[in-house]
Image: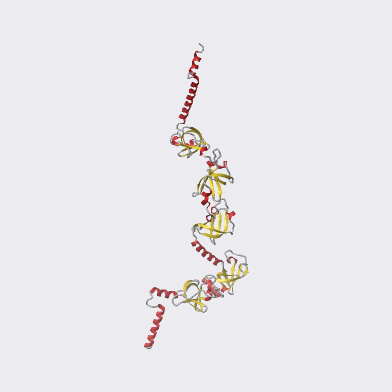
Amino acid sequence: MTEENIQNTVSDADAHADAMYGTEEEDFATLFEKSSTGSKRLEPGQKVNARVVSISGDYVFIDLGGKSEGVINLNEFIQEDGTYKVSEGETIDAFFVNFSDGLKRFTSKTRGYSTVDLQGIRNAYEASLPVNGKVVSELKGGFEVHVGKVRCFCPFSHIDLKGERKSEPYISQTFPFKVLEYKENGRNVILSRRVLLEEEQQERLVQFKESLQVGMEVTGKIRAIQKFGAFVDLGGIDGLIPSSELSWNRAERAENLLSVGQEVTVRVIAIDWEKNRLTLSIKSMQPDPYASAAENYPVDSMVKGTIVRLENFGAFVNLEPGVDGLIPISKFGAGKRIKHPKEVVEVGQLVEARVIDIDAASRKITLSMEQKINIEDIQFPAVGDIVNGTVEKVIPAGVFLKIGEHLNGFIPNSEMGTPRGTNHNRMFPAGTAMQAIVTEVDRNRKKVTLSRNKVDEKIEEDTYNSYRDSVKKEEQATGGLGNLGDLLREKWGSL
């Protein structure tokens, strides 16, 4: 070998090295990545993110790193108008199918990989990629599906998410299928559409869960109706509308408002993925009736409503959907003390009542069936009067005494005339008759304060004063000696 030949060989080697490994300016990590990418063994179905380096003939060439390239059929990118939605320099996702005819073949489709021969079906099976198939006819137990010119079989249970026996919706239709089995060199190919639909559904569920937030409005279909509410199918995820969230009207039942299959828009009010619970509401999407309750039900206004519930402490009256008022047991105007509202009213009864208090923020309206009494019409006792009454209620601070048709008095514990620590609730049950002295009267507040401490002294004093007054009247009638003169006549009259 001449010196010139040796020099040429060295130059060629240097050029090859430059082409393989780049210039010295490239760092080691970049060189390592280039050299390893091209030599890495690709597995069927493996996903790569690659740059389109050229479009030539029927193929799109993608860069796999180093000097390695893959090809994708150009037809995969054709659009309805005949143009191609791919261009040199863009980066795309592709899935490895197989190595044949000296080419590393890829597909850009995750649904419906096109193939027309047995080898293509086998490649799709090994790469776990779907194939496009046309449902041709119904067979015993399933459907005949043609993938290209290859006859395949899809069981009834795998044609849809729910196994279908009706052939009309599927015959002559083309769908993506997953190759479940490839046996006997392609003479027995089993397909499944359901597997792909389940994968799609699962992907949607994951995305849906990630996007869901409390307060969002979503649309779904009523799947089932129960006593406690209704289940809504939101596309693979079930949510529950509790009965309390169906309407502001608590009496409404799910079966009266909804029907299975009905499309509804609901609001998400609670999410608990750990327990797989999604709570929905229709009520929260409707105006809150309490927002205008203060305006609609002012104090002292008369209202009509229906008794919807009886409790020991009173009766609830429905004034409108979502708005209930309470008639306390002391406000029925029965003219006597009652132990339970059922003595006066019953569920379903229409009543008229007066609003005596409203707290819209706390969602409370207090009603009364008592006749409204003007303060001028109330007969107040005077300080020092002895009044008769009955025990209305005992509280830790003292005893309330009903002393008139529209008036109560209060006796503090210190004025009860009992030893300290006495259990007044036990000693004086409701309805116990009692006398007391009026110690204070506040007409504006309809407040009367009473005392039992000196009732006996007051009675004795009043009795003595009454006797003394009667004696004075007699003396005045007889000249002042009436009684003494009578005694003298009795003693000396016979002498």
- Residue closest to the eye, 362 or 39: 362
Relative horizontal placement of residue 278, taking residue 32 as reference (left or right): right
The residue most toward the top is 495
Relative horizontal placement of residue 471, taking residue 186 as reference (left or right): left
Q: Which corner quadrant of the image does residue 143 belong to?
A: bottom right
Residue 36 shows up from this direction: yes
Where is residue 5 shown, x and y percent of the image? 39, 87
Q: How many marks?
A: 0
The colour scheme of the drawn protein is secondary structure
Where is residue 244 shown, x and y percent of the image? 54, 52
* Quarter of the image with the N terminus in it: bottom left
- Residue closest to the eye, 167 or 439: 439
Q: Which corner quadrant of the image does residue 263 belong to?
A: bottom right
- Residue closest to the eye, 315 or 297: 297
The residue most toward the bottom is 2
Is 483 rendered above or below residue 423? above
Is 243 rendered above or below residue 93? above
**Which residue appears at 39% of the width and 85% of the height?**
8
Where is residue 475 shown, x and y percent of the image? 48, 21
**Which residue appears at 48% of the width and 23% of the height?**
472
